[in-house]
Image (cartoon, coloured by chain):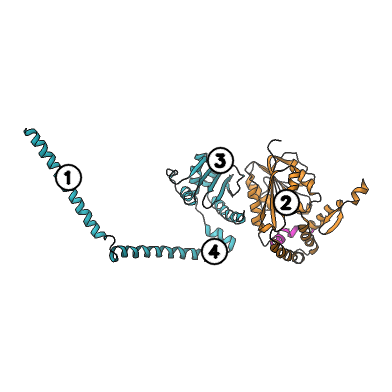
Chain colours: A cyan, B orange
Amino acid sequence: MVNSLFQSTIYSIIETGLNQALALDPATRKQIAMLSGKCMSIHCQSPDLLLNVLVCEQNLSLSGNEALQADITITGNASALIKLLLTRNTSSLKHDGIIITGDAGLLTRFQKILQNLDMDWEYQLSKFIGDIPTQFAHESIHSAGQFAKKARHNLQEDLDNYLHEEARLFPSMAELTDFYKSVDALRLRVDRLNSRILKLQSESATDF
Amino acid sequence: MSNDSQSKTTHFGYRQVAVEDKANLVGEVFHSVAKKYDLMNDVMSLGTHRIIKRFTVELSALRPGMKVLDLAGGTGDFSLLFSPLVGSQGQVILADINESMLRVGRDRIIDKGKSGNISYTLANAEQLPFTPNTFDCICIAYGLRNVTDKQAALNSMFEMTAPGGRVLILEFSKPVNPLLGKAYDVYSALWPKAGQLITGDGESYQYLVESIRMHPDQETLKQMMLEAGFENCEYHNLMGGICAIHVGHKATSR
């Protein structure tokens, strides 16, 4: 129960954001209203976290209370769960180690609603911590993201150069294309030789 | 009989007063602070009471269509949070023993345009005027402390809870860490002065500080709940036990 208050705060921010987005999106709100009273429980195993999404008429309510009985429970690890909620693909559930109990049809409907929502996180955050800190947070996150992207790109390029040109552990792209080309040519020649042998064999068989 | 009841006393803060006087004295405190109650809460809790309320509501496990009693609900904070959860098919009853607090709460809810599923009742927690086995959840937040006979209130709450329902008691409690306890004591000693500045009534806040210290600690309250008939009672310490939420359940079949 140590970080429950913290968790509650996070849920409260996300919930306000979701409901704000819903308020601006009547079509999605109608879809949501059809699920009123339904509860989807998402149980993340690593890190250990419980999130109940309860539909209350045209709003969503998030909570971390185990006592709330869910219509569908989804259990899995964080990355698999995020992937599941943000993509339409449900075919790889087993592969990702996700376990679903209850009304699986609900999942598809929740997925659709989540994917169609367009939220303004910055605005929500600004209501809690003010405009200037939000701007600062946004810039920091943005520049950190840019730096990470650039660093990754540079690292990739340097590693590439090192492995190919300096250490010569791997052949370069040109060498590789050349090699593949000669393999292809060789394969074609072998194929031709094979059919020639077959032809000769059949010819000699008819001779006797 | 009348002699007997006159000789019984109870605590009002650190003072001993006659049992029948306590409700009136507490009433005066809340009449006096009602209008600026929420502002003072922000000051006293450094704004954390919002998060604590939200956490308490999460524990209610309410769903659309359920009935909830917001007991000692005062300015209606909890009712406003419960209202969207139970939806138009559900019902929230805001009850308070104090007319001024209830009036502030009712006005606030009406001003926010959220009155659809909320009703108001002037009621004493010791003798709740409802049909037994009615509510899926009864919540009393920062209210039990001010009730004269706490056990009677718990018994009455148990009676009104529907089988399978639950009761939530949010109240100031005893800090687990003695060092935090000391720091909190120093901090809360400032409240009467802050109260004097903001509401112009320091005495009322003096009472609040004293009543918090006189309130039963976590384990004692849990025992009282068990005695009233609640099962699976547990409590969550918040901010190191400065506040605690007790949850009790009423069995589905008895």
The answer as to whether the residues below labels 4 and 2 share one chain is no
Proximity of marks 1 and 4: CB atoms separated by less than 8 Å: no
Q: CA distance from mark 1 to mark 3?
A: 61 Å
What chain is tagged by disc 4? A
Q: Is residue B113 above or below residue B134?
A: below
Q: Is residue B72 visible?
A: no
* Residue B33 inside the magenta-drawn segment: yes
- The three-letter amino acid code for the residue at tag 2 is Glu
- The three-letter amino acid code for the residue at tag 4 is Thr
- Mark 1: secondary structure: helix
Out of A7 and A161, give the one closest to the viewer: A161
Tag shown at residue A71: 3
- Mark 2: secondary structure: helix
**Residue drawn at the location 19% of the way across and 54% of the way down:** A182
Mark 3 nearby-residue class (10 Å; few <14, some 14–19, many ≥20):
some
Position of A41 with respect to A96 (left or right) is right
Looking at the image, the residue that sits furthest to the left is: A207
Mark 4 nearby-residue class (10 Å; few <14, some 14–19, many ≥20):
some
**Residue drawn at the location 47% of the way across and 47% of the way down:** A84
**Residue drawn at the location 57% of the way across and 52% of the way down:** A15
Mark 2 nearby-residue class (10 Å; few <14, some 14–19, many ≥20):
few
**Residue placed under numbered mark 1 in the picture:** A191
Proximity of marks 1 and 3: CB atoms separated by less than 8 Å: no
**Residue placed under numbered mark 2 in the picture:** B219
* Residue A68 inside the magenta-drawn segment: no
The answer as to whether the residues below labels 3 and 4 share one chain is yes
Q: CA distance from mark 2 to mark 3?
A: 35 Å
What chain is tagged by disc 2? B
What chain is tagged by disc 1? A
- Magenta span of residues: B32-42
**Residue placed under numbered mark 4 in the picture:** A134
